Each structure stands twice: as C-alpha cells, then as structure tokens.
Image: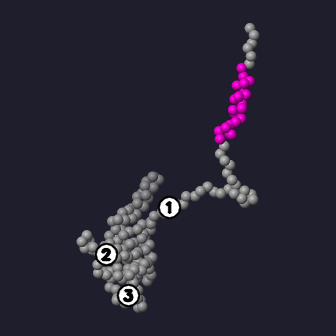
Amino acid sequence: MRTTTLLSGLCAALTVYAAPQSAQLSIQPISSKPQAPLPFASISYDLASPDASTITAYDAPDIPDSSSLVRIGIYDAKTKSWLSGTTVASTENFAKGYSPTITVSVNGRGDVVSAALKGVQIDAGQTRDFGPKVVLVTEGKGAQPVLNKPVVVSKEGKKVEEEAEKSFLQKYWWMIGIAVFIALSGGGGEQGK
C-alpha cells in the first residue's frame, strides 16, 4: 500500500517538472510619458531540456522615437505589477541588422525569475535564421565551501599547538623493553639428570 502511494507521488512530481511550461513576456518603453507594458513574446520551455526552449509568439515592439530604453519582464495587467525581475535594454537591440535574443532565468520550480534582451548582429552569409531566439537559464545549486578543521583554543584564548606525530619507536619503546627483558631472562637452566 505504501509503495503504491510513494510510487504514484513520485510519478506525479516527475510529471510536474517534465511538463512544458510557458510564459508571456512584456515590454515597456521608458520615456517621459509612461506607457503601459505591451505583450512582447510568448515562450515555451521545459526544465528537463532547456536547450529546446522556443518562442511560440513574437510581436515586434512599436517603440516611440522618444524612447531609447525598454524594460522587459513578466507583467500582470490585472494587478498592474511586474511579476518577475526586469531588465533594461537599449532600443538599438531592435535595429536593422540585429536579431533579439531573450534570456529567461527560471528557478527550480520553473517560475520565471527575470528576463533580459540582447540584440545579436546578423551575419547573412552564415545563417538564414534571422528570427528572435530564447535562451533558458535554470537555477542550480552553487558550489559549497570546503571548510578546514576548527581552530582549538586554550582556556587563555590562545591557539593550542598540535603535537607532532610520534614515530613507531617513540610510541612502543616500552614493548621493545619488555621483549628484550623476556628474551634475556627466559629459558631457565638445565636440570640435572
């Protein structure tokens, strides 16, 4: 009974993490006249295979000439607040000859933590794929510090020096003495016939 429950729980947990997820990114031109963020791109991603992330919908942003910067992230229109961390990028990332690459950072559950944008210069001689791309960065456990032995201090608060390791002779000299004593005192004399 418990094995079945444990197995079904494990399968359900794996299904949650294996299911493709999606996110709707928004863009907001930064200018003297504030504008509401607009839908920018929809992405689909899977934590099991981050390299297979794709852009499912992309609307080239209509950025006013007065704006030289844009903010990118996940925006909730109902609460009128940003749900993820945002980054600011130059509008030159959308200029002619550049293809936008969206970098999306997600945590271990698959929630979007932040989004960033970088325009990559297009080299028409090497590639025919001019469309926008998405790069998924997953959260991982960082390196753990390697700690040394704790420092031992005396009652006076000074560091206690470690004793040097003793050699075999220093440790067992007394056994050698006993062995020599037994060898010299052993035997007994011959008994008469």
Rendered location of residue 9, percent (x, y): 44, 59
Left or right, 156 with reference to 105: right
Residue sitting farthest toward the bottom: 33
Which quarter of the figure has residue 76? bottom left
| Alpha carbons under labels 3 and 1: distance apart | 41 Å
Q: Give the colour scheme of this rendering.
A: one colour
Rendered location of residue 164, percent (x, y): 66, 47
Q: Residue at x 24, y 71 (%)?
A: 125
| Alpha carbons under labels 2 and 3: distance apart | 21 Å
Of residues 157 and 38, the one drawn nearer to the viewer in this rendering:
157
Q: Which mark is residue 67?
A: 3
**In the image, what residue type sits under mark 1?**
Ala
Q: Residue at x 36, y 83 (%)?
A: 91
Which quarter of the figure has residue 171? top right
Labels 1 and 2 touching (C-beta < 8 A): no
Left or right, 91 with reference to 184: left
User: What residue span does the magenta drawing correspond to?
Assistant: 167-187
Label 1 element class: loop
| Alpha carbons under labels 1 and 2: distance apart | 34 Å
Label 3 element class: loop
Q: Which mark is residue 169?
A: none
Of residues 67 and 74, the one drawn nearer to the viewer in this rendering:
67
Q: Residue at x 71, y 35 (%)?
A: 174
Label 2 element class: strand
The residue indicated by pointer 2 is 121
Report the number of numbered marks: 3
**Considering only order in the chain, which callout, 3 or 2, is on the residue closer to the N terminus?**
3
Q: Nearer the viewer, mark 2 or mark 3?
A: 2
